[in-house]
Image: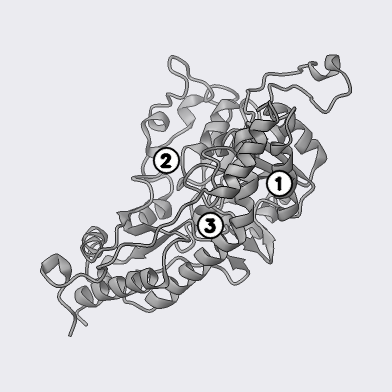
Amino acid sequence: MSETLALYGGPKVKTTPFGTGRRFGEPEKKQLGEAIDQNTLFYWYGHKVKDFTQKFARMCGVPYCAAVSSGTAAIHTALSAVGVTAGDEVITTPITDMGSVIGIFYQNAIPVFADVDPHTYNLDPKSVEEKITPQTKAIEVVHLAGNAADIGAILKIAAKHGIKVVEDCAQAYGCTVDGKPVGTFGDAGCYSLNDFKHLSAGDGGMVITKDEDVYRRAFRFADKNYDRLAKDNGAMRRVEYLAPNYRMTELQGAVAVSQLDRLERIVSTRRSYGDRITEGIGGLPGIDPPAVRKNVRSSYWFYMFRVDEKEAGVSRDDFSRALAAEGIPNQPGYIPTCIYDYDLFRNKNVFPGSDLPFSIRHDPDSIHYGKGLCPVAEKVLETAIRFNMSEFYTPQDIDDIIRAIRKVSAHFAGK
């Protein structure tokens, strides 16, 4: 017979606080002190940003890494570096943050949304191929929550159609496919140092690549299109086209280079915790843990599972409330709705007072956003429950999460 839920007056599962810890400490202070002692915080005159990019490139096994001011800036920079421009189409996922599409719009290109796999929540290669048109320039692959998309299948599609691939790895530090880090498969990979990611410098980002030409274009684009690798000042300032200022500061570089020393521990802890939860809730009726393919190692930026109302005997929202009452904070879904249902998309109001980019090489009336565009993605968000993961959690915290999910499941399944 199932236990009485805390929601209905029973004792709750989680009675102790979740483990916490400090993300910054003496190593960061030391690096910051050295940055201050340089008497410059400009990335080109100091050495912290250079140290960081070289170290991160080595960790990823690629020759090139360009530093930028944010993960959003990294994606914008990468899209420009692979040649995305006005009127082009970029295929991506509707389950993501706005940071994944801002750069598309700033290039006056058009986001095209493909549907997702119902179990990994990442791009479905079949849907991607169905969305390709003569205007498709790139596929932006988001590795959601530290779990890799089917990058092998997507690369085959891209090669077949002559399309570039940019990987959004903002949530996927330490995630690997066949032992290789995500971000190293496509033409460019993008990472974020936002304060909520596996690693943090407050903000910042990186573009990694194996292609020297992509690197040089990315390096220039992030710095107003100045070529600081040129031999003289005149050549440096030979600006051929518009580019933003996305420079990383030496303070960010100092914190970031120190953070890298913690990455392996952070990722291995999160991976063990995430895999343990999946094992612990596997087989529960109507409870669908996130699928991680056999050749993938996820790094679990967050954990998200789905609730099948008929099989579980309970709605997603009621399961979420019951889980919270057991002491496990969570939220229904990841984002409230697929991003193509945001006002900006439905009203085609990217640049107020303008129909750009939809009128470039397109009939604006032929472009449609809104509910029904990607039915699997919409269903995922309607049935998912998400909770945070942390390397500071304790094994007891993970056991409590598992026990709470199992308790709620057993109650509503009548077991």
Task: State how far apart marks 3 and 2 are (Cα).
Answer: 19 Å
Q: Which circle's residue, 3 or 1, is located before the other in the chain?
A: 3
| Residue type pointed to by label 1 | His
Residue in the image at 65% along x and 63% along y = 177
Q: Nearer the viewer, residue 47 or 98?
A: 47
**Label 3 vs label 1, nearer the camera:** 3
Badge number at residue 161: 1
Please say if the residues under marks 3 and 2 sit with CB atoms less than 8 Å apart: no
What's the colour scheme? one colour
Q: Which image quadrant for residue 2?
A: bottom left
Where residue 361 sits in the image (x, y, percent)?
60, 24
Question: Dot 2: few (<14), some (14–19), or many (≥20) neighbours within 10 Å?
Answer: many
**Label 3 vs label 2, nearer the camera:** 3
Task: State how far apart marks 3 and 1 are (Cα).
Answer: 27 Å
Q: Which circle's residue, 2 or 1, is located before the other in the chain?
A: 1
Name the residue that disc number 2 marks.
Answer: 339
Confirm whether residue 260 shows in the render. Answer: yes
Whether 396 is drawn above or below 261: the answer is below
| Residue type pointed to by label 3 | Gly
Q: Which circle's residue, 3 or 2, is located before the other in the chain?
A: 3
Seen in the image, is 156 located left or right of residue 140? right
Name the residue that disc number 3 marks.
Answer: 146
Q: Nearer the viewer, residue 45 or 339?
A: 45
Q: Nearer the viewer, residue 116 or 188?
A: 188
Whether 405 is drawn above or below 58: the answer is below
Question: Dot 1: few (<14), some (14–19), or many (≥20) neighbours within 10 Å?
Answer: some
Whether 393 is drawn above or below 359: the answer is below
Confirm whether residue 174 shows in the render. Answer: no
| Quadrant assignment for the N terminus | bottom left
Q: Secondary structure at mark 1?
A: helix
Q: Nearer the viewer, residue 202 or 320?
A: 202
| Residue type pointed to by label 2 | Ile
